[in-house]
Image (spheres, grey):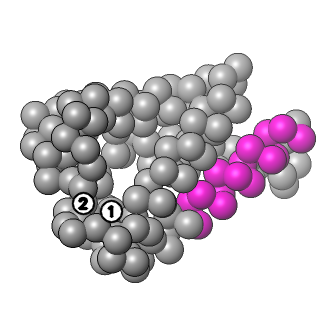
Amino acid sequence: MILTILTYIIIGLFVLLWAHTGIPKLFNIARFRKTLKTQYMPAWLKPMFAWLIPLSETAATILLLLPSTALIGMYLSLALIGVFTIYVGGIYFNMYDKYPCPCGGIFTKMGWKKHFKVNIMLTLTAAIGILLMELGY
């Protein structure tokens, strides 16, 4: 019972996270596209990522809300937060020349150290969520 409740809490956490970050990007795609232009990545990737990131975050939200696809949504959540954690880790360890944050919501107000720590915790939380769901909780 407790593990089932924990699973629902983890799902709810990621629904809130992805809805909070992905949906606003879709509604203001021009602003997000402009922010991506300042990111440290190959220029040819930026137009694709301008749509891929918010659509993936929104897809994760929808997948997590449906019981039949929640596990897929949690795997997508782990992949997304894992990639974001690697990116923020690169910023935290000064691996890039510039590091503006295209993040959404509360993440724009965090320093890089806190952002990195939160992302690590979210990555671990997603992995725990997958484990619980795979075990049937």
* Residue 6, image x, y percentages: 74, 53
Q: Earlier in the sequence, mark 2 or mark 1?
A: 2
Can you identify the residue that label 2 sits on? 101
Does residue 134 sit above or below 122 in this rendering? above
> SS for tag 1?
helix
- The three-letter amino acid code for the residue at tag 1 is Phe
Q: Position of residue 36 (x, y in %)?
A: 19, 46
Badge 2 crowding class, 10 Å Cα cut-off, few under 14, some 14 to 19, many 20 or more, is: some
Specify the quadrant that holds the C terminus.
Answer: top right
Magenta stretch contains residue 129: yes
- Camera-side residue of 49 and 134: 49
Residue identified by numbered label 1: 107
Whether residue 1 is visible here, answered yes or no, is: yes
Proximity of marks 2 and 1: CB atoms separated by less than 8 Å: yes
Residue type beneath disc 2: Cys
Q: Position of residue 94 (x, y in %)?
A: 33, 76
Q: Is residue 86 magenta?
A: no
Q: Toward the viewer: 38 or 106? A: 38
